[in-house]
Image (tube, helix red, strand yellow):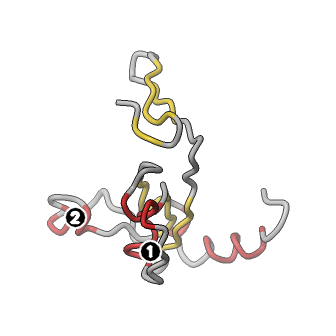
């Protein structure tokens, strides 16, 4: 659900079956060189690395060591839409297979 723009989101993820699934998840520290530069490059490949981001749709096989040889496991779609979500106070806690909680991000940066 969305308080605004839900129709736009629904249309974007209705492109094909793969549009409803993640194509990318990137944890980028608040202290990243791109964000710290204060510049807007007007190039998604640079600008998305100013913040944590996730995307629905197509996964880029070049971002995985053996991705170009993979026949399954990557999401396929005609679309790829990034959402930037990082902040200076972002906290992320991971849960291990045995239920332990581990800090991954604290105050916008890696805690590990």
Give the mark, 1 or 2, whose residue is nearer the N terminus.
2
Mark number, residue 71: 2
Point 55% across, 61% down: residue: 84
Q: Secondary structure at mark 2?
A: loop
* Residue at the image position 36 percent from the left and 60 percent from the top: 33
Residue 10: where, in percent of width, then height?
70, 70
At which x and y percent is residue 111? 40, 31
Q: Nearer the viewer, residue 107 or 52?
A: 107
Q: Quadrant of residue 77?
A: bottom left
Question: For the residue labelled by badge 1, is the local secondary structure a helix, a strand or a loop?
Answer: loop
Q: Residue at x 40, y 65 (%)?
A: 34
Q: Is residue 70 left or right of residue 21?
A: left
Q: Is residue 72 left or right of residue 66?
A: right
Q: Eyeballing the image, is 98 above or below 59?
A: above
Question: Residue 47: percent from the left, percent from the top?
Answer: 45, 72
Does 32 sit left or right of 68 as displayed? right
**Residue 67, image x, y percentages:** 21, 63
Q: Residues within 10 Å of mark 1 (few under 14, many from 20)?
A: some
| 102 to the left or right of 16 | left
| Closer mark to the observer between disc 1 and disc 2 | 1
Q: Is residue 62 above or below residue 109?
A: below
Report the residue marked by disc 1.
77
The residue at the point 85 percent across, 60 percent down is 3
Do labels 1 and 2 touch, CB within 8 Å?
A: no
In front of the other: 76 or 62: 62
Q: Residue furthest bottom?
A: 42
Q: How many discs mark residues in the rendered view?
A: 2
- Quarter of the rendering containing residue 63: bottom left
């Amino acid at each position: 659900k969305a308080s605004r723009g839900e129709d736009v989101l629904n249309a974007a993820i209705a492109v094909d079956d793969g549009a409803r699934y993640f194509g990318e998840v990137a944890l980028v520290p608040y202290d990243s060189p791109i964000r710290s530069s204060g510049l807007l490059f007007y190039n998604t490949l640079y600008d998305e690395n100013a913040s944590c981001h996730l995307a629905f749709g197509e996964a880029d096989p070049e971002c995985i060591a053996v991705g170009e040889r993979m026949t399954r496991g990557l999401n396929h779609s005609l679309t790829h839409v990034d959402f930037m979500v990082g902040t200076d106070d972002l906290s992320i806690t991971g849960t291990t297979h045995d239920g332990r909680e581990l800090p991954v991000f604290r105050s916008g940066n890696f805690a590990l």
